[in-house]
Image: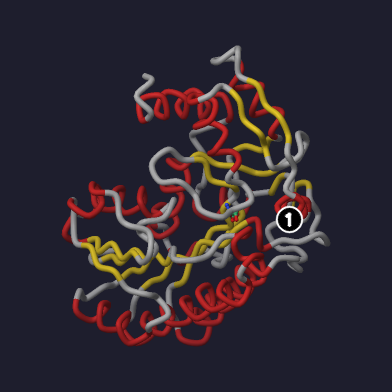
Amino acid sequence: MKKILVTGATGQIGSELTMALRDRFGADNVLAAGHGRPPLSKLQQSGPYCSFDVRDASVLRQVVEDYQIDTIFHLASLLSAVGEEKPQLAWDINMNGLLNVLEAARVHGCAVFFPSSIGAFGPGTPAVDTPQDTIQRPATLYGITKVSGELLCDYYHRRFGVDTRGLRYPGLISNVALPGGGTTDYAVDIFYEAVKSGHYDCFLDADTQLDMMYMPDAIDAAIWLMTADGRKLRHRNAFNITAMSFTPRQLAAEIQKHLPGFTIGYRIDPVRQAIADSWPRHMDDSAARAEWGWRPRFGLPKMVEDMLEKIAVKLGKG
Ligand code: AKB
């Protein structure tokens, strides 16, 4: 990894991954590409930044050529809930964007990181200890693009030798950039409301259990996988990874240990509830542990402590 392009660099993962890559590989060697959402000033000022739509294949190819890119972290994508509102747009961005990235990678010899998701599973998948290799029949358009993306990445590896690697991320909890339009967003929103007003109305039911991960682990995992010895990877697209698994009720109880006055209510959104109900409760990530040594640093108590501290500072309540 000498010259890196991050698409979707202004999003929830991209804002932090870009900075971590700049720290590790040199600020000038990491080109951040956004579109739509304005970049945080730190991201824009700390290294090269450009704006383009990943659906524009010729601009993408030109950028890869001009910057002599050898690795692409392709994060630009619509999330699950917004994907149900705009299914045609989600297909267009998620699939045509990925195809353009894979084509640019094939022509210019780049490696590609692809973020898949627990959304790649569906109601027919075993929900507990979800195996690495199992039934993938998702019920959402987002999930369909994630399964298709996994298959397309594997195809480009097998057929054209492109070094494609991916992770099936669980819900991601972060304090730099907000997520936008996901089903697991409650696990971020709750912290802002806990600090701001002491109360949160959750759009998922109290006992909806889902896999989750704190952003520092998600960032480490992406870099870890992309720097792993490719000869040891039996799977490529994409590895199950998880760090914790909890319900809104359990998350609220952990927050109450720090903020005893915090209260939670439930105003269920049927669309997001149906999506969550179709996803695994807890994935088996033993393939990632065995093939490239994956292990998370943050469990629920440590994540909650760190999130509350960071959000309080961010909101001027620290
Ligand atoms: C979403 O909720 O859509 C994402 C995901 C789990 O892929 N956070």
Q: Residue at x 53, y 45 (%)?
A: 172
**Quarter-wise, where is residue 132 in the image?**
bottom right
Left or right: where 292 falls relative to 144:
left
Identify the secondary structure beneath mark 1.
Answer: helix
User: Which quadrant contains ligand 1?
Assistant: bottom right
In the image, what residue occupies the spot 51% across and 30% down? 303
How was this image coloured?
secondary structure
Residue that numbered label 1 is attached to: 271
Question: In the image, residue 140 lies at what x, y percent?
Answer: 70, 66
Q: Residue at x 60, y 68 (%)?
A: 146
Residue type of the residue flagged with mark 1 = Val
Residue 149, horizontal then vertical, whole percent: 57, 73
Q: Position of residue 296 (x, y in %)?
A: 51, 39
Q: Is residue 161 left or right of residue 272?
A: left
Toward the viewer: 307 or 234?
307
Query: Residue 202 in the image: x percent, y percent?
Result: 67, 37
Number of numbered discs on residues:
1
Q: Residue 239 versus residue 58: which sits nearer the camera?
A: 58
- On screen, residue 59 above or below 209: below
* The C terminus, quarter of image: top left
Q: Residue furthest top?
A: 260
Residue sitting at 45 percent across and 56 percent down?
225
